[in-house]
Image: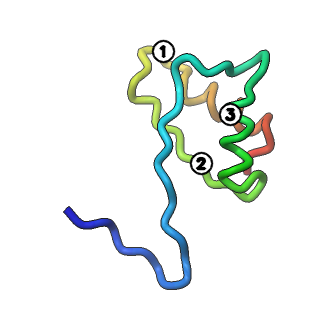
Amino acid sequence: MSPSPVVEDTDRGWIVPIGGAEEKVNDPDILRRFVKCAGGEDSRIAIIPTASSLEDTGDRYVEIFESLGAG
């Protein structure tokens, strides 16, 4: 297996699985740190809710990340 090509003068992104037991509402320190490390308002975050059986999981994470300042 080989990695996908990267456009010259760009950086390869990261896949960081999160979810499950992290606090999403009352004290979202883990998600806040995630947004900061991803670039804050310049971040590009893809949400892939494959492990959830709840239909609104993806939309919920979009709202949470936007409320934490993600771009």
Numbered disc total: 3
**Does 44 sit above or below residue 57?**
below
Q: Closer to the N terminus: mark 1 or mark 3?
A: 3
Q: Closer to the N terminus: mark 3 or mark 2?
A: 3
Q: Give the Cα separation between the discs numbered 1 and 2.
A: 20 Å
Q: Closer to the N terminus: mark 1 or mark 2?
A: 2
Numbered disc in front, either 3 or 2: 3
- Report the residue at 53% width, 71% height from top: 11
Q: Who is closer to the viewer here, 67 or 31?
A: 31
For mark 1, what is the residue?
54
Residue 43 horizontal side relative to residue 1, left or right: right
Q: How is the image coloured?
A: rainbow
Q: Secondary structure at mark 1?
A: loop
Q: Residue furthest left?
A: 1
Q: Amino acid at mark 1?
A: Leu
Numbered disc in front, either 1 or 3: 3
For mark 2, what is the residue?
45
- Report the residue at 73% width, 59% height from top: 42
x and y percent of residue 6 in the render? 43, 75
Q: Which mark is residue 31?
A: 3
Q: Amino acid at mark 2?
A: Ile
Q: Secondary structure at mark 3?
A: helix
Q: Amino acid at mark 3?
A: Leu
Q: Are marks 1 and 2 in contact (CB under 8 Å)?
A: no
**Does 55 sit above or below residue 38?**
above
Q: Are marks 3 and 2 in contact (CB under 8 Å)?
A: no
Q: Secondary structure at mark 2?
A: loop
